[in-house]
Amino acid sequence: STPFEESADIVNNTLAKEHRSNSSSLFSQHSGNDKSTDSNLNTCTENVREQKGRFGSDSIEAADALVALACQYWEKGDRVTATELYTEAHSAYENKLGDSKEVAMVLKSLGDLNKEDEKFDAAKHLYMEALDMEQDVYGHYLPQTLNAVGILCLEQDDFRAAMEYHRRALQIQKKQSSRGEQSKYEMYETLVRIGNVYYSERNNLTNIRSKGVDYKDFIASGFLGWIANAHDMRGEYSKSKQFYEELLQIYTTKDTKEAKRETALTLNRLGSLSRELGLYDEAMDYHQRALHLQQSTSSAAKAMTAETCVLMGMTKIKMCEYKKALDLFEDALLVLKSSLGKRHSSVATTLSQIGAVHFEMGDFTMAMTTLTEAEHNQISSIGENSRDTLETQAMIGRVLCRQGEYDTALKKLRAVANKQMTLFGASHPSIADTKQYIGEVFLEQGMASEARAMYIDSYNMRKLFFSMDQIHIAESMVDIIRAREGKPEQALAVYKNAMDVYKEYLCDDHIQIGRLLMFEGDAYAELLDFSTAVERYEKAKRIFLDVLDEGHVVEADVAGACILFLLCSQIVVATSDFDCFRLIHRISQSIWEKSCFENVITTVQKITFIGP
């Protein structure tokens, strides 16, 4: 049987979910984490002393305090002390409570510590003790412990046992799936574990030689698709692609209507994953193949082809082809409303993407109107804690920021980040994106240190999911150096490396390349190299005006800054008044960041009138 049942919206709706050589010290966050850890250790140590004094060394209160202290030492990397503290807590719990969830929890933790020390036999013995106690206390095993044993079995190449433990964990999680979105993401983790066993056993040299691996039933039951989806939902896009590519090979060997339908869905999923990885041309190719297949199949529903067009539009946004994206969305929206109804989640997703286009084009009023409608529909159809709803709310936060409503934007984005962490855990590409947006809000207000902290958090999180030569990492590097004042030489080095990455992934007239040219101009201006600064600004201006409509001058305001710097350079050459230049530089940047083109021109006129 399939691992677990999803709603039709998730299974069938293709719209449902989306470094080069530099000193690492440049991107390190000196946030006092070590001091914070030491402070927590001191607090927990004092708490142990207090609880033992009040209730006795073998009291439950003392054991609770010992567990908290053990966690702190474990987090610090001192597994020896953590083990000693857990062992002491185990003794107290066992004396006072006997078989209990507290004793089972400590046994599981001691097993984890032994596994980290590669003491696999001891770890397995502790896990088995924990499982026996969980059965007595809860009436069933805990999936986390079953998965821990499965991971341990895989370490020892005991593939069949590993698969069995993970499957048993999944069965229990299926029964508990009514608890909501969080339990669903726990199942995704188990599915990923099952996928690890599948690939490890299939690629094991001994099994290959003996031809001892037969996964026909495993594949037929749909596990490959569920594992691919699990990796996708966990933000592990490259791994998800591997499973979907294997699934695509299986479907293309079949010549049935159902196989063609699944082929189109898989092509669209591969396209979405390629888009998340910054491979936009590849993404368009996958979606176009899906669309061609759907159009050649008479039984394909209009809504399915419309959803494919929406996915193509989402890629067009990333390629800065905003007009084409908007046309795709608007045409698809009519079909989706007619076929599925105005309240369907695919309609809401399409509205959200229309709002995203208007945001990129600088029409914030229209963006807010459309995004608000999408958010309302998503909350009523798929809930306020779904991935798509949160992405819409994050975009609303970005619009609020560009409208100057910083407090409201910050509140919105922080709420999104908190929900995402509840949904995905501590790390996920979507959380990294939201942290980047929070950084934008701080930087817009001139709060460079706060912005830098967010950008570094985003960078460190993205490193868990993307390679150092991917566009996501380059983007984070640029953000971090932008929020570090007084380092123009270092900034130029980062910008050069980022430009190399951008040109591998993006077309020459992409908005992100224009913005990077703009940042390079800032760095050269700070170095008083006005001719190079103006040259960079002029290149950026041409890109912005080529990509954006003339009526949307948010990015094209760089033209005003170029004019201003041309005048400033002439003033400086005539008077050598560098303090005057720096003042004008700050004024122009402040005006420019607020996207007030007319104010830039007014300031230029005043400077020209006043003269040197």
Image (cartoon, grey):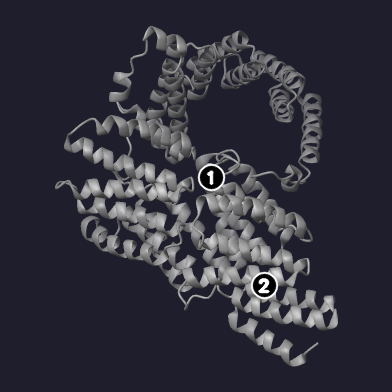
User: x, y (%) of residue 58?
Assistant: 73, 18
Closest to the observer: 375 or 316?
316
Q: In which quarter of the image is residue 21?
A: top right
Q: Badge 1 local density, few (<14 within 10 Å), some, or many (20+)?
A: many
Quote the CA–CA distance across marks 1 and 2. 36 Å
Q: Badge 2 local density, few (<14 within 10 Å), some, or many (20+)?
A: many
Q: Mark 1 points at which residue?
A: 429
Left or right? Give the position of 551 relative to 323. Answer: right
Q: Which of marks 1 and 2 is in front?
A: 2
Closest to the observer: 524 or 318?
524
Q: Name the residue under label 2.
A: 534
User: x, y (%) of residue 193?
Assistant: 47, 25
* N-terminal label among 1 and 2: 1
Task: Tell me what residue is drawn at x 52 percent, y 19 percent.
Answer: 151
Task: Tell me what residue is drawn at x 74 percent, y 57 percent.
Answer: 484
Left or right? Give the position of 36 relative to 346. Answer: right
Q: In which quarter of the image is the C terminus?
A: bottom right
User: x, y (%) of residue 75?
Assistant: 70, 30
Dot 1: element: helix
- Vertical arrangement, residue 557 with respect to residue 228, above or below: below
Q: What residue type is labelled 2?
A: Val
Q: In which quarter of the image is the N terminus?
A: top left
Left or right? Give the position of 211 relative to 82. Answer: left
Q: Can residue 181 be seen in this view?
A: yes
Q: What residue type is labelled 1?
A: Pro
Q: Is residue 7 visible?
A: no
Closest to the observer: 594 or 324?
324
- Which residue appears farthest toward the left when viewing the image? 298
